[in-house]
């Protein structure tokens, strides 16, 4: 996770959490339900940095804010970077079916709030989950429609440099993350797209191109295209 002060997850806004009886928003009328994107990568590959940049410059795209039982790191804020909860509270939420997916990563529990995600999607926002490989498998297994992207570091040596450069983890923790990364990178073929995070700006552009392409799929453009087609039938010829 980057040490950037920008929020990890935009989360729900008041407008997103509005009473559904208030009727559809302008965006819902235009595009219907939002799209779900999943981004996974080994720790230190730069997925948080990439996705924060992506959402900053992509209208109607929100990064989900996960729940975690891990302690906040220096510079992290509850309700901004994560929803920090106790392990006990997390387990109660999991038992109550409140997560779309959850997993244990590096000894801590992490989960995506089902209601939070649903509120965003049903208000017409596209949502990006930055979750580990196990979490992505669970969402896929649950049958939810999603577009998945695996972010690769350019090499193991670069990954190690980034983990050290971030200077958030102890030497033992860095070694543990590199060990787990070996298994994670081998999972890239489970994903729809692969983005190599070499040069940051171009990697963000490639990630954005996935979002743009998904938004342009025929079934999502059907309504707009039909509206345009209908303008042709109104042309009067003498
Ligand atoms: P992750 O969320 O995957 O664990 P981070 O976003 O925290 O990774 O990034 C890990 C470190 O690598 C951070 O210090 C970040 O600034 C740096 N970083 C991310 N992307 C790049 C890049 N393309 N080139 C160089 N450094 C990068
Ligand atoms: P960190 O502790 O460095 O912020 O995150 C550790 C790992 O947990 C990262 O691989 C991150 O993608 C993953 N993670 C963060 N939130 C979630 C979540 O909600 N679900 C799952 N499955 N993994 C998550």
Image (cartoon, rainbow, N blue to C red):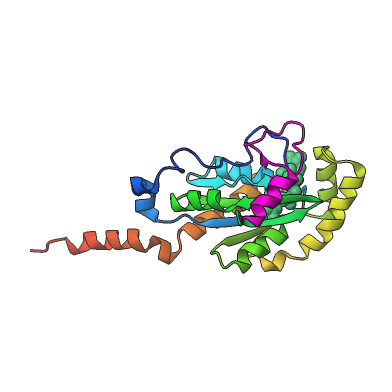
Stretch in magenta? 68-96
Does residue 208 appear anywhere in the picture? Answer: no
| Point 63% across, 46% down: residue | 51
Figure check: 30 above or below 201: below
The residue positioned 73% from the left and 35% from the top of the image is: 3
Nearer to the camera, 161 or 110: 110
Q: Residue at x 57, y 61 (%)?
A: 147
Q: Is residue 158 above or below residue 146?
A: above
How many numbered discs, if any?
Answer: 0
Instruction: Answer with left or right where residue 224 lies relative to residue 7.
Output: left
Evaluate whether residue 80 shows in this view.
yes
Could you say where residue 91 lies in the image, as x and y percent from the top left?
70, 51
Quarter of the image containing the C terminus? bottom left
Quarter of the image for the N terminus: give it.
top right
Residue 175, placed above or below residue 15 = below
Image position of 58 (left or right of 161)? left
Residue 33 within the magenta-colored segment of the rendering: no
Q: Whole-percent x and y of residue 137?
A: 67, 64
> Residue 170 appears at what percent x and percent y?
89, 41
Residue 192, by quadrant, is bottom right
Of residues 103 and 168, the one nearer the viewer is 103
Q: Image point 58% across, 51% down: which residue?
A: 128
Left-right relation of 77 to 119: right
Q: Residue furthest left?
A: 238
Picture coordinates of residue 58, whole percent (x, y): 52, 45
Compared to residue 146, the image places residue 25 above or below, namely above
């Amino acid at each position: 996770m980057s040490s950037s002060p920008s929020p990890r997850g935009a989360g729900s806004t008041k407008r997103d959490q509005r009473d559904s009886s208030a009727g559809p928003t302008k965006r819902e009328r235009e595009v219907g339900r939002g799209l779900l994107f999943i981004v996974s990568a080994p720790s230190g590959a730069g997925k948080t940095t990439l996705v924060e940049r992506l959402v900053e410059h992509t209208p109607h795209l929100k990064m989900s804010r996960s729940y975690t039982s891990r302690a906040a790191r220096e510079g992290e804020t509850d309700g901004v970077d994560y929803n920090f909860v106790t392990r006990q509270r997390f387990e109660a939420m999991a038992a109550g079916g409140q997560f779309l997916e959850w997993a244990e990563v590096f000894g801590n529990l992490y989960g995506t709030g089902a209601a939070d995600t649903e509120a965003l999607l049903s208000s017409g926002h596209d949502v990006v989950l930055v979750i580990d490989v196990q979490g992505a498998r669970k969402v896929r297994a649950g049958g939810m429609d999603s577009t998945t992207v695996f972010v690769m570091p350019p090499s193991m040596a670069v990954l190690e440099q980034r983990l050290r450069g971030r200077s958030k983890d102890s030497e033992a923790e860095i070694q543990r993350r590199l060990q787990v990364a070996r298994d994670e990178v081998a999972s890239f073929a489970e994903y729809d797209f692969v983005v190599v995070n070499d040069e940051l700006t171009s990697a963000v552009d490639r990630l954005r191109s996935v979002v743009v392409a998904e938004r342009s799929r025929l079934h999502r453009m059907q309504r707009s295209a039909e509206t345009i087609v209908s303008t042709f039938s109104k042309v009067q010829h003498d």
